């Protein structure tokens, strides 16, 4: 009899600028069913939610119906956990000029609780529930993608701050003089240097301001990506390696400051750029050791996300559902 | 009958490098009795605790005996909340070369629970229980004294991190190039510029590297204190004002980075340097507004400690007792 009450699954929605990926996930992080739609092409949020629900129905049935599902978690740009809203998300045509109560809209359509947060926070909860942060109470996830995001966990709780927007570590200032302009409108932010776009920019700067040889010179400078830099560094190209050393050094210096804030037991790196492996992780660790306050030395681990490749973001989003 | 079980008081101990000040405090922050001993002059921690207990006995009796006292809170340099120990405190002759289990020692002697943390954390708990942070769940206390300390509260809980030493915001790096040497052995720390000693140092640097007129030139440079700078600025001295503007600007820039971490509803400044009032607070607020990420603008208040002058530290320490 008791078995009838058990709801073994949550729905995860990784709401990206291009694709919206759904997964139905069990408590061990196994994805039971998955589907996806395009995020764009809907003039209103209502139409977007209609399309989501239509796509979800078959996989919900496949897993035994909505009665088997405890809740839904959403990882979305500019997602606010407190209000369940997406606020002025620049890259969403149905959400760029206002506040979309997305959690409430899904709740009304699906009849289950829905929680929403930004993608970096979702990644942090995902690491805590399914990933390398299982059992940890104090850690920081840093997402290295188009931008630099972060999810901070203290005392086993995600840090949302007074407004739901805490944990914007991509926007601490690393260069107070002559800093690179950042997409946020300020200059010198960590993100302006250490995101995938920042790495590509470092490459273009180094190629333009020096005449050092590099395999990167075979590419059109405007087309260079962080992946190109990683592949070229993997071939032993000194200049490409130096770009990752510069990037890792700044990340390590930033982490040393973050340690002074929350003394985490681990820094966990998430996202495409972690594929560069030791190329990026070794300079991070070296700069951290050289810069961190004495009392914190040797206390934090430096880890790469334990969530599996393409499913990482949807797993992270689903994990938010377990927190409802 | 129920009244007999009520324990209306806690003991607070503000353990400073020179004096150890005790207060017996009620839940509204009223100090019922107080006493003090010198911190130094005891070769061992046991002898120090003996002297403390001897000094405490009369004021405990005055308040109705130990049965009326719920717990004791201690604010101490290098105090670790998790372990109740003082660890390698450089300024304590009975504690500089080891780990002193001070909380346990007091517990055994007094028969009540004892909690211990560093002075900045004690100040933060004090503000939350008795001061301007009553009702707040997310705020940062920054202590401006001989050093720069901090106590961070997130979700209503003090941030101790994985090791009990989190919240060392005086040691985030504000100048990565040519930073001033800091007492911690590194360079460019917030504390090296914005502590009372940092302010005096800024004064000496400005006097030595310019020939601008200033009333501060009437003093022996080596004897200048932050109080001298504050008094001189109060007389309208342009150079002295500029020193506080420089100091406040850096504090405001630092707070803008801290907002990206925990998005607090308030920054609360504590300690002697806050007596400079608007001289320091106005440049802090101005630099914060100019530097903080857009989404955090206008959300945080800038406040001066609500704990009363000379009693502030002992009130803070006592507040730790209520948290036991």
Image: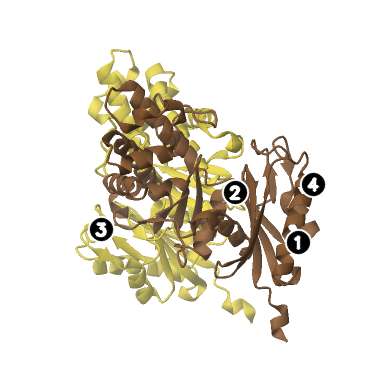
Chain colours: A brown, B yellow
Residue for badge 3: B88
Sequence-first tag of 2 and 4: 4
Dot label at residue A11: none
Residue for badge 1: A57
Element type at marker 1? helix
Element type at marker 2? loop
- Report, in whole angstroms, how far the alpha carbon at label 3 lies from the one at label 1: 62 Å
Sequence-first tag of 4 and 1: 4
Please give the chain letter of the residue carrying mark 1. A
Q: Residue at x 56, y 62 (%)?
A: B27
Sequence-first tag of 2 and 1: 1
- Report, in whole angstroms, how far the alpha carbon at label 3 lies from the one at label 4: 61 Å
Label 3 or label 4, whichever lies nearer to me, is 4
Q: Residue at x 51, y 39 (%)?
A: A146
Above or below, comparing residue A187 to residue B57 in the picture: above
Q: Position of residue B271 (x, y in %)?
A: 43, 42
- Report, in whole angstroms, how far the alpha carbon at label 2 lies from the one at label 4: 20 Å
For the residues beneath circles 3 and 2, the answer to whether they share a chain is no
Tell me if B266 is positioned left or right of B199 in this view. right
């Amino acid at each position: 009899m008791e078995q009838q009450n058990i709801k073994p699954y949550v729905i995860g929605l990784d709401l990206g600028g291009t694709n919206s990926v759904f997964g139905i996930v069990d408590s061990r992080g196994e994805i039971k069913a998955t589907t996806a739609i395009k995020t764009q092409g809907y003039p209103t949020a209502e139409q977007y939610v209609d399309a989501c629900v239509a796509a979800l129905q078959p996989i919900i049935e496949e897993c035994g119906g909505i009665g088997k599902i405890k809740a839904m978690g959403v990882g979305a740009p500019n997602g606010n956990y407190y209000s369940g809203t997406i606020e002025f998300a620049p890259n969403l045509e149905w959400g760029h000029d206002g506040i979309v109560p997305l959690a409430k809209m899904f709740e009304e359509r699906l009849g289950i609780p829905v929680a929403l947060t930004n993608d970096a926070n979702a990644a942090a909860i995902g690491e805590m529930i399914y990933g390398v942060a299982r059992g940890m109470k104090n850690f920081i996830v840093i997402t290295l993608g188009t931008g630099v995001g972060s999810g901070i966990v203290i005392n086993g709780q995600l840090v949302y701050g007074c407004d739901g927007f805490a944990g914007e570590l991509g926007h601490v200032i690393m260069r107070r003089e002559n800093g690179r302009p950042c997409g946020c409108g300020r200059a010198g932010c960590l993100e302006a240097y250490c995101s995938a776009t920042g790495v590509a920019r470092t490459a273009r700067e180094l190629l333009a301001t020096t005449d050092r040889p590099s395999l990167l010179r075979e590419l059109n400078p405007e087309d260079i990506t962080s992946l190109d830099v990683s592949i070229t560094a993997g071939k032993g190209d000194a200049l490409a390696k130096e770009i990752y050393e510069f990037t890792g050094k700044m990340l390590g210096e930033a982490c040393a400051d973050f340690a002074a804030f929350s003394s985490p037991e681990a820094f966990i790196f998430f996202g495409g750029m972690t594929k560069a492996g030791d190329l990026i992780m070794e300079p991070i660790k070296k700069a951290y050791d050289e810069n961190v306050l004495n009392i914190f030395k040797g206390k934090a681990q430096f880890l790469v996300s334990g969530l599996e490749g393409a499913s990482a973001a949807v797993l992270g989003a689903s994990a938010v559902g377990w927190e409802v």
